[in-house]
């Protein structure tokens, strides 16, 4: 950027009048509305106005109009900024619409069975209406907890190895294979855990801990990737300052680098948990299906919430609606569990991160 | 007793989770009140962890009070078609025998047979009877050298469902159904359809034929019917995987097909009759008349069918008479078998399987299945034969 | 204090810690080797057995599914990457601070929705909603091969799958990219602001270059999930074994993972092996794509903020 352009910016710092944005928006909506209804009336097959198309055309018209106005009045640099603001906000809005629709679908349809029974009853001896997901909630908490216990230490230590220690062939190999691991389809992870357990315990084995292993295979690469990115962007100045004070490397990593990256790592772990807590396919294979509560992850089948949701939908009894209601409520509970875990992770990173 | 050991946490009769725990007593004494504020957090944490850790924290509906002498756990897996039936059977059986736990994984017929062969489960449900080459294998859960029994327990009509505005019922013969699903008849006002339904005003709308995208016994039985009755048009044979050249739309599972048919306009599909709901259904031409699906019409087809030849006496595999011309018979049915060992390695398992299988084929068990899945009950003569097989289990 | 004691202490701590780190790295290799060996061992019978599960040969069987997997993932990534960057930028640099935190958390939550639910939503809500747009696209742009007819009656098409996958990977990608953008050295941003840069110029000069490697990395994570996604695709897509670029019809190529999920429960013998062999192929393409991504990142590594 040259001094000239900055000066020019200061001199020409006229800004858009306040009334322009709302007026432009109104004009854009009106224009879009009339264009679309003209199109709809010329087309006999279109029975109703496509609101999606109306919104789309309106937004595009508004963006172009606003950009041109800004370009004329405020100049090129300012107008580029305006355009990007519109684009970024638009991207956000566009992405949020389906996400809200999804969340709303889950909440709306899940509310029907969101009652005390759902949290205190299992499905043992329940046919048709009633019953709950107590057994599945216990199973999901235990299996996800175990998977986290396995994955987080391995994941974080591997990321530390890659960022702080890794040199040479081994580091390259680990980096590469972590990438490969991110692509393991969940069903293959389940098959793998099943095959491994069959070798140890004999055929037909079903165990909660097997599910935890399968989920770990899926979770570890996410933890590593997220942690690695966070560790990489810890400024080297911090490490060098620590070394200069004579602090050993392992203390530098645990006391300086990790705390600096903690907020990001916590988010990463949360994402990893969120990624695996909703996995259905591997748990169906190795943790199995049961209607009863089982507290022991090292023995027999264990129900989990995703499997509960899936089987409730897939194997509806003759009173189909009660099964569908249970499925949606199961999904809602899963979301709430992650929400609570998320809040815990936020608190952890808030209290333990260095301020700055 | 609880009150003494933990004065601030008053537990009611059932100390299990479910809002049945009063963390703080309702009428605290002054002694309690003194400590309450400081200890309330601790108590909450301890209470919560005690609930999770203690063995008694079962679900509120899992309480036991028993008269039955049976106890133990057995697991089976297999056909998802009979999943809702197994769910109902297990519930009733467990209520009668509270110390028994039965699990049934509706993981699919192939997976069920394989798990049974490998010894992972002690009984299985399957939509297709054992193949000869499978029977030649060793069965790990059974005594060495012994082979499994099987008999039908779940006879479910398959409905041909469709979604066409203003039409509730259609009359179609096998050749037309085959033509629609093979992608040869593509419009609802095709002559083949209108000629059989002179009273209906069928629109000029293209047909979307919905089939199962996952391999399933339903597809197998449906295509078996088409193969046996309209061989000239349906050339793909009895299949589980839909042939690509037939086109149409794939959907996962019975619920997926029902949802896809419901969501579209001019759609047609096939699904377990109990899931047909409000959708229109096709009456199939058998002999000279058109037959709508019903449990009675479906059970008649078993009576008209014969056993597969060359099987042991304990192997009641049926060759369904799809091409029957007897009036009032609905030939598109799915028959699902129960299978287990003639001789178990473990006597306790044998006792449980005997009791459970006897219950399933009993009149009560079959009535339960009928209300849970709209199935046809097995006939008295079939029940007699099956009971004899069960009695011989060791 | 003698000068020797701390040196010895330091060495023990470092030794233990670095060995732990190396051990974890090796553990990853072991796990992955185990998965690979398992996949390989289980898929061998499909090639050796006399009864042929795939009559036209393995590659003829897997080719359409491979094509479908790549196509669906590319659509998903094309849609999700710009949107994820948009969301991340909005939360990190545009939204009011209080609002942005709440927004960030709520988007994280969506990553937790089970894929079954994405599938159900895609099938029951999204597909019927999008179908009129597909009809419109086909009417007006039918000459583009992607929008060829006949349009599906239910909207359960490749395009819908691509959009559902994009929505599924959005929360993960947006969360990671946001964290990276938030870590942009404040000095860089303030320096740019001090020069009179507009917000867009700050982003262009300080934020994006800093986050480039991270963006590619998160795109790879998203791609990994899109490639391997099972249940959602199985529920939404009306798939079979065809190769076509038409995105709006009922006849779509299935994806490898969805095909495994659909056929596995009823499979036995060599057919099971065949399905697992297709899993091996998925493994291989993931590897290839990741190699490509690594290569791109390594060419850009001079932008990394730390060094």
Image (tube, coloured by chain):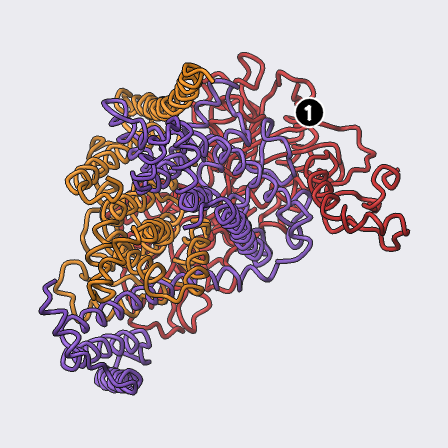
Chain colours: A purple, B red, C orange
* Displayed quadrant of residue A64: bottom left
Q: Position of residue B277 (x, y in %)?
A: 52, 61
* Quadrant where the C terminus of chain C is found in the figure: top left
Is A182 on the left-hand or right-hand side of C199? Answer: right
Q: Nearer the viewer, residue A192 or B44?
A: B44
Residue hosting label 1: B391
Q: Is residue B50 above or below residue A99?
A: above
Residue under the image location 46 percent in, 52 percent down: C113
Q: Nearer the viewer, residue C260 or B159?
A: C260
Q: Chain of mark 1?
A: B
Q: Is residue C183 above or below residue A53?
A: above
Residue under the image location 54 percent in, 26 percent down: B315
Q: Position of residue C183 (x, y in %)?
A: 33, 50
Q: Nearer the viewer, residue B173 or A12?
A: A12
Say if residue B334 shows up in the picture. yes
Q: Residue furthest front?
A: C1
Q: Secondary structure at mark 1?
A: helix
* Displayed quadrant of residue B45: top right
Q: Nearer the viewer, residue B347 or B42?
A: B42
Q: Position of residue A254 (x, y in %)?
A: 43, 33
How many residues crowd around disc 1 within 10 Å: few (fewer than 14), some, or many (20 or more)? few
Say if residue B303 shows up in the picture. no
Residue under the image location 70 percent in, 24 percent down: B351
* Displayed quadrant of residue C297: top left
Is C257 on the left-hand or right-hand side of C102? Answer: left
Is B16 on the left-hand or right-hand side of B394? Answer: right
Q: Is residue C142 above or below residue A327?
A: below
């Amino acid at each position: 950027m040259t001094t000239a352009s900055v000066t020019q910016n200061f001199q020409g710092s006229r800004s858009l009048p306040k009334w322009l944005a709302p007026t432009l928006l109104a004009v854009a909506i009106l224009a879009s509305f009339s264009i679309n209804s003209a199109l709809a009336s010329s087309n006999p097959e279109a029975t109703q106005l496509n609101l999606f198309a109306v919104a789309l055309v309106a937004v595009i018209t508004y963006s172009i109009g606003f950009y041109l106005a800004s370009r004329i009045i405020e100049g090129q640099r300012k107008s580029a900024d305006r355009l990007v603001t519109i684009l970024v906000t638009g991207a956000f809005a566009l992405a949020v619409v389906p996400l809200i629709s999804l969340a709303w679908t889950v909440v709306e349809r899940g509310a029907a069975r969101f009652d005390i029974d759902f949290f205190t009853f299992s499905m043992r001896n329940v046919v048709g209406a009633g019953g709950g997901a107590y057994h599945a909630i216990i199973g999901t908490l235990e299996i996800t907890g175990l998977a986290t216990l396995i994955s987080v230490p391995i994941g974080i230590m591997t990321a530390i190895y890659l960022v702080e220690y890794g040199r040479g062939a081994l580091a390259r190999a680990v980096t590469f294979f972590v990438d490969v691991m991110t692509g393991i389809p969940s069903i293959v992870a389940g098959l793998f855990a099943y095959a491994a357990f069959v070798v140890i315990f004999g055929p037909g084995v079903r165990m909660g801990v097997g599910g935890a292993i399968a989920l770990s295979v899926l979770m570890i690469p996410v933890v590593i990737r997220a942690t690695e990115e966070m560790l990489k962007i810890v400024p080297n100045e911090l490490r060098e300052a620590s070394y200069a004070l004579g602090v050993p490397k392992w203390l530098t990593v645990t006391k300086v680098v990790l705390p600096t990256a903690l907020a990001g790592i916590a988010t990463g772990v949360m994402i990893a948990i969120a990624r695996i807590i909703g996995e259905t396919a591997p748990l169906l294979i190795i943790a199995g299906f049961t209607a009863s509560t089982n507290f022991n992850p090292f023995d027999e089948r264990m129900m989990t919430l995703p499997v509960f949701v899936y089987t409730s939908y897939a194997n509806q009894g003759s009173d189909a609606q009660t099964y569908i209601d249970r499925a949606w409520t199961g999904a809602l509970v899963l979301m709430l569990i992650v929400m609570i875990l998320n809040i815990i992770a936020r608190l952890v990173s808030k209290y333990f991160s260095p301020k700055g | 007793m609880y009150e003494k050991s933990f004065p601030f946490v008053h537990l009611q009769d059932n100390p299990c989770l479910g809002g049945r725990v009063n963390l703080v007593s309702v009428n605290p004494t002054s002694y309690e009140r003194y400590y309450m504020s400081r200890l309330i957090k601790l108590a909450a944490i301890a209470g919560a962890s005690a609930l999770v850790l203690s063995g008694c924290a079962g679900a509120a509906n899992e309480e036991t009070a028993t008269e039955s002498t049976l106890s133990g756990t057995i697991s089976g897996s297999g056909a998802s078609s009979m999943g809702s039936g197994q769910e109902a059977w297990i519930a009733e059986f467990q209520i009668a025998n509270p110390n028994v736990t039965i699990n049934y994984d509706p993981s699919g017929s192939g997976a069920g047979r394989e798990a049974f062969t490998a010894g992972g489960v002690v009984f299985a449900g399957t939509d297709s009877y054992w193949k000869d080459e499978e029977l030649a294998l060793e069965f790990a859960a059974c005594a060495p050298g012994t082979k499994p029994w099987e008999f039908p327990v779940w006879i479910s009509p398959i409905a041909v469902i469709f979604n066409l505005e203003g039409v509730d019922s259609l009359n179609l013969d096998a050749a037309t159904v085959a033509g629609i699903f093979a992608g040869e008849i593509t419009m609802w006002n095709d002559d083949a359809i209108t000629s059989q339904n002179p009273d209906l005003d069928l629109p000029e709308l293209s047909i979307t034929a919905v089939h199962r995208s996952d391999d399933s016994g339903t597809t197998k039985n449906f295509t078996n019917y088409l193969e046996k009755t309209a061989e000239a048009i349906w050339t793909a044979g009895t299949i589980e995987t839909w042939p690509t050249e037939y086109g149409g739309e794939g959907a996962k599972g019975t619920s997926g097909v029902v949802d896809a048919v419901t969501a579209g306009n001019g759609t047609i599909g096939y699904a377990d009759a109990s899931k047909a709901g409000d959708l229109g259904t096709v009456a199939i031409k058998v002999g000279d008349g058109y037959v709508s699906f019903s449990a009675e019409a479906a059970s008649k087809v078993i009576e008209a069918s014969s056993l597969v030849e060359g099987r042991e006496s304990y192997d009641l595999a049926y060759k369904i008479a799809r091409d029957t011309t007897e009036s009032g018979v609905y030939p598109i049915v799915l028959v699902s078998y129960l299978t287990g060992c003639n001789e178990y390695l473990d006597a306790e398992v044998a006792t449980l399987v005997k009791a459970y299988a006897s219950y399933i084929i009993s009149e009560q068990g079959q009535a339960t299945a009928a209300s849970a899945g709209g199935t046809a009950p097995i006939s008295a003569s079939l029940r007699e034969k099956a009971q004899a097989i069960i009695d011989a289990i060791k | 204090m003698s000068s020797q004691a701390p040196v010895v202490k330091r060495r023990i701590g470092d030794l233990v810690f670095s060995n732990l780190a190396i051990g974890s790295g090796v553990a990853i290799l072991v796990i992955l080797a185990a998965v690979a060996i398992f996949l390989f061992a289980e898929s061998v019978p499909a090639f050796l057995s006399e009864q042929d599960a795939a009559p036209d040969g393995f590659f003829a069987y897997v080719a359409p599914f491979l094509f479908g997997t790549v196509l669906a993932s590319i659509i998903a990534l094309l849609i999700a990457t710009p949107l994820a960057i948009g969301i991340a930028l909005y939360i990190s640099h545009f939204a009011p601070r209080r609002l942005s935190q709440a927004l960030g958390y709520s988007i994280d939550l969506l990553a937790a929705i089970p894929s079954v639910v994405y599938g159900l939503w895609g099938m029951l809500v999204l597909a019927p909603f999008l179908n009129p747009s597909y009809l419109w696209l086909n009417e007006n742009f039918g000459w583009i091969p992607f929008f060829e007819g006949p349009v599906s009656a239910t909207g359960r098409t490749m395009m819908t799958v691509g959009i559902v996958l994009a929505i599924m990977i959005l929360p993960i990608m947006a969360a990671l990219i946001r964290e990276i953008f938030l870590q942009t050295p404040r000095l860089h941003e303030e320096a740019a602001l001090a020069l009179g840069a507009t917000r867009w110029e700050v982003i262009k000069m300080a934020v994006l270059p800093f986050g480039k490697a991270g963006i590619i990395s998160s795109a790879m994570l998203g791609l990994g999930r899109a490639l391997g996604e099972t249940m959602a695709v199985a529920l939404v897509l009306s798939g079979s074994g065809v190769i076509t670029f038409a995105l709006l019809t009922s006849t779509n190529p299935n994806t490898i993972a969805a095909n495994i999920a659909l056929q596995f429960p009823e499979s036995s013998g060599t057919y099971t092996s065949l399905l697992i062999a297709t899993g091996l192929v998925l493994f291989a393409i993931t590897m290839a794509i990741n190699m490509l991504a690594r290569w791109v990142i390594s060419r850009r590594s001079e932008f990394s903020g730390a060094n």
